[in-house]
Amino acid sequence: MSHSLPKVELHLHLEGAAPPALIRAMAQERNEDLSGIFDESGNYSYRDFWDFLRVYEAATSVLRTPADYYRLTRAVLEECVNSGVIYVESFLSPDFCGGRDVVAWRDYLGAIREAAEEARRQDGIEMRGIVTAIRHFGPEKARETALCAAETAGDFITGFGLAGDETMGRPRDFAWSFDCAREAGLRLTAHAGEWGGPDSVAAVIDDLRVERIGHGVRAIEDLALVERIAEAGIVLEVCPGSNIALGVYPDWRSHPIEKLRERGVKVTVSTDDPPFFHTTMIREYRMLVDTFGWDESDLSELALNAARAAFCDEQTRAAVL
Ligand code: ADE
Ligand code: ZN
């Protein structure tokens, strides 16, 4: 059932979706030893979220040139197509693509767009980019990232976001960057409620004025906040497989996606960093069916919520709907 359903994915980190085989091949081409970040089966290996961030950044360190990002984007979109994804929004990081230099960033973006355009022609998949600042790199670098986002805002770069270690800094430290992105016409999302509790979720709503939240699931610890999110129509980019792999929740049964939905929150489902978490969109859908007994109409609702919340033009939305 879940193979054939058209899927819409709103929360996918481009580097986090890099197939380990691609990263290994690139490391070998460059004579670099990255063996420490893989297990015996060739998968990414990490102990916890903070170690995951270290391994993520080590893997990303072999992606050097725009041509590397072209290869990466082609490989990632191929995996999306294999899961039946027809529209995907990916977090893109000028921190890794040219060190937040606008001129260099344009080159990387050009390569990513070329790959996206070819995938669209070949497989019909639509991609949009959300330029994303990394919280643990600090507010100063986030400002430079926001300027890269504002300079390239348009039909492909349609959003601005914040990822990384939610336990570092406060959302309000990033308000300038979010204001800058909003003024450039970008739509806004921020990671919260993954490692932080309800206060962290409320802070991105109040201080960054986001319309979507990456994860947001720990809002469930404050039912008044859940009601506020539902009433405001703020959409959660829920990534259950990621939360379970990283230990936010011990198992699928304990995941709050069902409770959030029952309380009227608009939920969507994504994979976050699929090879790190041994997941795909097909697996996420299958686990929702197996765990909560969701049927085809429940799954279609996920895709519909995602299509409605997508940061794209109305013509593209109509084609996805
Ligand atoms: N960057 C990539 N994956 C992430 C996650 N799950 N949380 C925060 N930042 C991330
Ligand atoms: Zn994420």
Image (cartoon, rainbow, N blue to C red):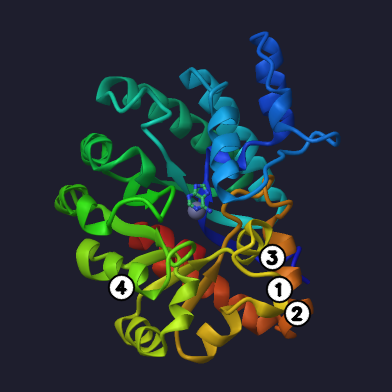
Q: Is mark 4 within 8 Å of ligand 1?
A: no
Q: Earlier in the sequence, mark 2 or mark 4?
A: 4
Q: Is residue 295 visible?
A: no
Q: Is residue 18 visible?
A: yes
Which circle's residue, 1 or 2, is located before the other in the chain?
1
- Mark 3 vs mark 1, foreground winner is 1
**Residue 167 spot, x, y in % from top left:** 40, 55
Give SS at disc 4.
helix
Q: Residue furthest top?
A: 31
Residue at 78 percent across and 72 percent down: it is 1
The residue tagged 4 is 202
Q: Amino acid at mark 2?
A: Thr
Q: Position of residue 309 (x, y in %)?
A: 40, 68
Question: What residue would you read off at disc 1?
Answer: 252
Instruction: Please tell me whether residue 214 is drawn above or below residue 234 in the rendered image.
Output: above
Q: Secondary structure at mark 1?
A: helix
Query: Could you tell me how far apart the alpha carbons at marks 2 and 4 are, in whole angstroms?
Result: 29 Å
Of mark 4 and mark 1, the one earlier in the sequence is: 4
Q: Which residue is mark 3?
A: 284
**3 or 2: mark nearer the eye:** 2
Residues at discs 1 and 2 in contact (Cβ within 8 Å): yes
Give the residue type at disc 1.
Trp
Which of the labelled discs sits on residue 291, or is there none?
Answer: 2
| Residue under the point 63% across and 82% down | 298
Quarter-of-image position of residue 255: bottom right
Q: Is residue 8 left or right of residue 178?
A: right
- Of residues 141 and 250, the one drawn nearer to the viewer in this rendering: 250
**Cβ atoms at labels 2 and 4 below 8 Å apart:** no
